[in-house]
Image: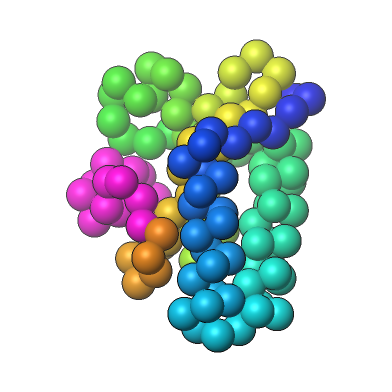
Amino acid sequence: MSKVLFTEPAEYDLVSIEDYIRDILNNPTSAIRVVDDIIKEFYLLKQFPKKHGYVRDKFLIGLGTRMSKFTQSVFIFVLAFHELIIYDIGSRNNSFIFLMDVPIESNLFHF
């Protein structure tokens, strides 16, 4: 796998995570650490992307859409040729402002 790419919404999610922790939780040091840890996890994900399960939705499975959990976050990604494309970064507990478009409670994603 040669590249990790982020869609524009995923980039926005990452910025929103940092902004929320820095500004709302008033913890700039943690904001940097959390974002750095998430980015490191993407590069680990790049090494073993197939160890992560598919989402439940049959249409999305047909597109190769997989999901990975990391601390309080959920990553939605697709393997495409030699690229790992990150589509969404969401909260596992829905307590943050950067929630996924489809709530985890909707059972769309399989844990």
Work out which quarter of the rendered image holds the N terminus and state it: top right
On screen, residue 55 versus residue 80, left or right, reads: left
**Closer to the camera in the image, 28 or 55:** 28
Q: Total label count?
A: 0
Q: Nearer the viewer, residue 40 or 21?
A: 21
Residue 35 colored magenta?
A: no
Q: Residue at x 75, y 37 (%)?
A: 47
Against 7, is 33 above or below? below
Residue at x 70% of width, y 69% of height:
32
Q: Position of residue 89 (x, y in %)?
A: 48, 49
Is 34 on the left or on the right of 40, as rendered? Answer: left
Extreme-bottom residue of the structure: 26
Task: Answer with left or right where residue 93 lies relative to residue 72.
Answer: left
State yes or no: residue 105 in magenta.
yes
**Nearest the eye: 71 or 22:** 22
72 shown above or below 77: below
Task: Give whichever of 97, 48 is nearer the camera.
Answer: 97
Q: Tell me: 43 left or right of 21.
A: right
Residue at position x 56%, y 45% from top? 11
95 up-or-down from 110: above or below: below
Q: Residue at x 71, y 18 (%)?
A: 82
Q: Is residue 75 visible?
A: no
Q: Residue furthest top?
A: 81
Q: Position of residue 34 (x, y in %)?
A: 64, 68
The secondary structure making up most of the magenta span is loop
Question: Which quarter of the picture shows residue 92?
Answer: bottom left
Range shown magenta: 99-111
Residue 49 rendering spot, x and y as whole percentages:
63, 35
